[in-house]
Amino acid sequence: MAASSSNGFRVIGTRPIRHDGVDKVTGRAKYGADYAFPGMLHGKVLRSPHPHANIKSIKIDKALALPGVKAIVTSADLPALPDKMEAAGEQAINLNHLSMNILARGKALYDGHPIAAVAATSPHIADEALRLIEVEYELLPPVMTVEDAMKPGATILLPSLRNKEDGPDKETNVAAHLQFKRGDVAEGFKQADYVIEREFKTAMVHQGYIEPHNAVGIYNADGHATIYCSTQGSFVVRALSAAVLGIAEGKIKVVPAEIGGGFGGKTTIYLEPLSVLLSQKTGHPVKLTMTRAEVLRATGPTSGSTIRCKMGATKDGKLVAAQCWLAYEAGAFPGSPVGAGAMTIVAPYNIPNILVDAYDVVVNRPKTAAYRAPGASNAAMASETVLDELAEKCGIDPLEMRLMNGSEEGTPQTVGPPFKRIGFKETVEAIKNSPHYKSKLTGANRGRGVASGFWFNVGLQSSATVNIHTDGTVSVVIGSVDIGGTRAAQAMIAAEVLGVDINDVRPTIADTDSIGHTDVTGGSRTCFATGWAVYEAAQDCVRQLKERAAKLWEKKPDEVVFENGMLSPAQPGGELKPMSIKQIASRLARTGGPIVGRATVNARGVGPAFATVCVDVEVDPDTGKTQILRATIAQDAGKAIHPSYVEGQMQGGMAQGLGWGLNEEYFYDDRGILRNTGLLDYRMPTCLDLPAIETAIVEVPTPGHPLGIRGVGEVSIVPPPAALANAIYHAVGVRMTELPMSPPRLLKAILKKRAAGEAQAAAAD
Amino acid sequence: MSRRPRDPHHNEKIAAEFDPAADDGGPKLSRRSFLKGAGAAAAVAGLLGVQPAAADDAAPEPPLAGAAERLGPGPATFKLRINGATRTVTAEPRVTLLGVLRDHLGLTGAKLVCDRGACGACTVHLDGAPVTSCMMLAIDARGHEITTIEGLGAPDRMHALQDAFVAKDALQCGFCTPGMTMALSAALEANPNPSPAEIKHAIAGNICRCGTYPHVIEAALAAAQAARGQA
Ligand code: FES
Ligand code: FES
């Protein structure tokens, strides 16, 4: 790789070796489940085998009597919390729902809902103890789909749930109805020459991080607790665990372990408060880890959805109106990403008339958690395939259609102020100019599809400390866990500002007592916001370095210049020789002591992200199996700090999006029991399912950010399912409206089309 | 890959082969889940003669074949050869090789992801061949040379693959990395000059949710090249 990058940066834009690489390839990196402490007990969670039931009684005496069992807890051991939105740390959340998801209170609301937790001297004994806990259930009818949940007279999941529209007296499964509106859709559709309207169904899918959830809790006699766990947000774990346990936030320290993938799913809590509670009861450290079945049954997933999408265009391809209706499965408690789905569904386009209705619906499935651009992939599946149909009707190339209607600086957003400088059209151009799109695709049953996607990205709060050591090396301390290159990117920013070698910078991820508040590694915010904090903290060092040099030289700080790691007098000539950071570092004691740069940000002015992808497929018309032949993604990164990691995020998100499109799905039987709780049945893409994903990084800097960074972690998952659907259409002529487009579903569609064709031919004869 | 094609379902097939219930279409109780759940002496004694990882090779006669050995249900003390050293372990017979490595010996490089032979994250070498250590009982590993990621290389003398993984950035979160590395190092040992397709075949049973497969394949090719260059 080139040693230095373009546009004036020395380190940024290059591809140095990651700092945690050796630890991770030699098996030494410590993930949450790798921690062990003397006297540690093992915890296990008893889970409801029923999707919907009243819990009449829980008897634990037999289990407690089993030798080796040290403690058993149920929701009776947790404080009752208010059933309303409250602040927990930095977020507003219904603490009662949160607590009820940690341990069921009165009702089991999904297959896998935690009922009780056991601590024992071995995991096997804990497992045996679970079998001895006697729970009496009164079964209730499961409500598995948004359609069933929204029906009048539907079985109610949460008796206290109300929504604004239906008022304070009506029990409901609809937690919220949101509406976004611009212009007048009825008028808009009147101007349209072509109107396409389709209904889509997308299946519930899991983030699929391969590392199961884990936590080790150590409760101290002085009332302080420490939690070791793999999480995307140590401060979130602290705030939420404290709230659920009813202890002060400051009494919990969270030590973030290495994390084996999260993709949004590790931004909440499951086992963490249980580990503390069991430790408190037993006086021992307690470790809990989930099995794969537990991960699939009771954590993560993102919403399945029903979406209706109607869009209209004039003959010459101008989009004039869009009307969308979205209902997302929230799982057992409110909080699906339907709002984000509604706000992203047509965001890449400048459409004068929009009406979007969105419903957050509770069903007897696990409470959903964030998954990479939450809610946006479902939505894009609808809008981006309808757009493809419109382009075909208009006889316009689908990329041209996107360029003609694409959002740009000044285009109004679905909600909020108009877009600032964005790079959407640039991503479309990048695909247009890609070797992939320019290549010819030939062969039977092969097709090419394109699609685009939008994600907001977030800013939020980050803290950073940069220390100059006596030998001139630098440590960067942050609170953002490294989920795929954070250490390297942050070290690079510090190295850039300080003009030092990247190998002289050591990044460290601190626990919650050792760094200022830092929000989750999520929302594509880490490089943007934590990077901003590191940039400012390094600048703080530069300021101090200048002061120290001035002191040594008996000058004023503004008579010192700092460039490329060298301090020199502003007026050249004379006795004074330029000094490197290494040189001044050993003399800091004489100039007033160590240099610690620090900064905190609440990063505003976040730059939204866009991506456009192109996929070639070959469909086997006899089996319905789709093989992906080639895939390319273009994405706006603002400024790519470490291009390899930007590409990694683009490829990783796209790989997940392709799995979502073709294979992945939660199968519940008619009793509401999840049937595919292992990795053979919940089938994620292997290397045989995926082509090498080609990438094109677009760089349209975010205005206002010192380095122009845009988050890159999420938008890559948005367009792939729709692009696959479009490619499948161009391969075999069927428009798929359901995800995943698995072989049985696709085969059914192909056979239906064939039968219709034959019927038509017969009628013509 | 001449010596042993890496079949992602290798372990299950072996398990099914020796599953007493499998032939008659009866309930599919896998041998391992049976053993793990029961931890019973009789079952162990009856099946110990089978060495899963060596079953399709002309392996040396298993050391305990036919012996009416009684182990369990309580802890048993036995010896394992791990990373060139002999380790004495006291564990219940139902504990898997992965369980012993991680929970008894502190070798946490191999990862527990699915516990069902479906993801490859727990891959170690048994006499040089890759096995999913979650699918094997620790007592069945007696008499075999076990190599874990910790024994493949160390920071000061990394295996060519480990170097290549770092250089080619073949990891994102790194959780699949130990398993990938072990699967590939066995494959390269068997076939020092693999094609990309052969490499894919070798890691077909290793799931990487971060989607790093292309980088992994690149790293394997680079490592193979480096190793050949040295030879
Ligand atoms: S944990 Fe052994 S194969 Fe998945
Ligand atoms: S690097 Fe995360 S699963 Fe492979």
Image (cartoon, coloured by chain):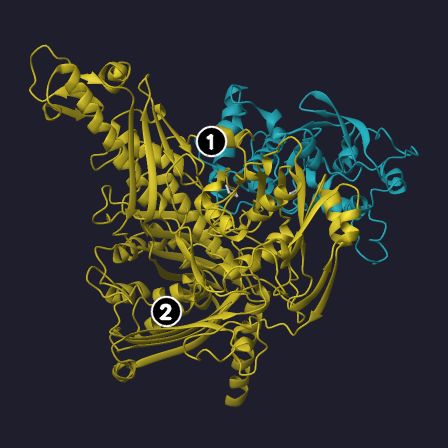
Q: Residue at x 53, y 53 (%)?
A: A244
User: Is there any visible trace of residue A208 in the rendered image?
Assistant: no
Horizontal arrangement in the rendering, residue A11 relative to residue B128 (left or right): left
- How many numbered marks does the figure carry? 2
Identified by mark 1, the residue type is Gly
Q: Colour of chain B?
A: cyan
Q: Which residue is mark 2?
A: A388
* Disc 1 residue: CB within 8 Å of ligand 2: no
Identified by mark 2, the residue type is Asp
Look at the numbered disc 1 and give the secondary structure of its residue.
Answer: helix
Quadrant of ligand 1: it is top right
Which chain is disc 2 placed on? A
Q: Colour of chain A?
A: yellow
Q: Are marks 1 and 2 on the same chain?
A: yes
Q: Residue at x 48, y 39 (%)?
A: A253
Horizontal arrangement in the rendering, residue A300 relative to residue B52 (left or right): left
Q: Residue A363, relative to residue B168: is it above or below?
A: below
Which chain is disc 1 placed on? A
Q: Quadrant of residue A318?
A: bottom left
Q: Position of residue A196 (x, y in %)?
A: 37, 78
Q: Position of residue A308 (x, y in %)?
A: 42, 75
Q: Which residue is mark 1?
A: A21
Front residue of B188/A612: it is A612
Q: Position of residue B45 (x, y in %)?
A: 89, 38
Q: Residue at x 38, y 57 (%)?
A: A614
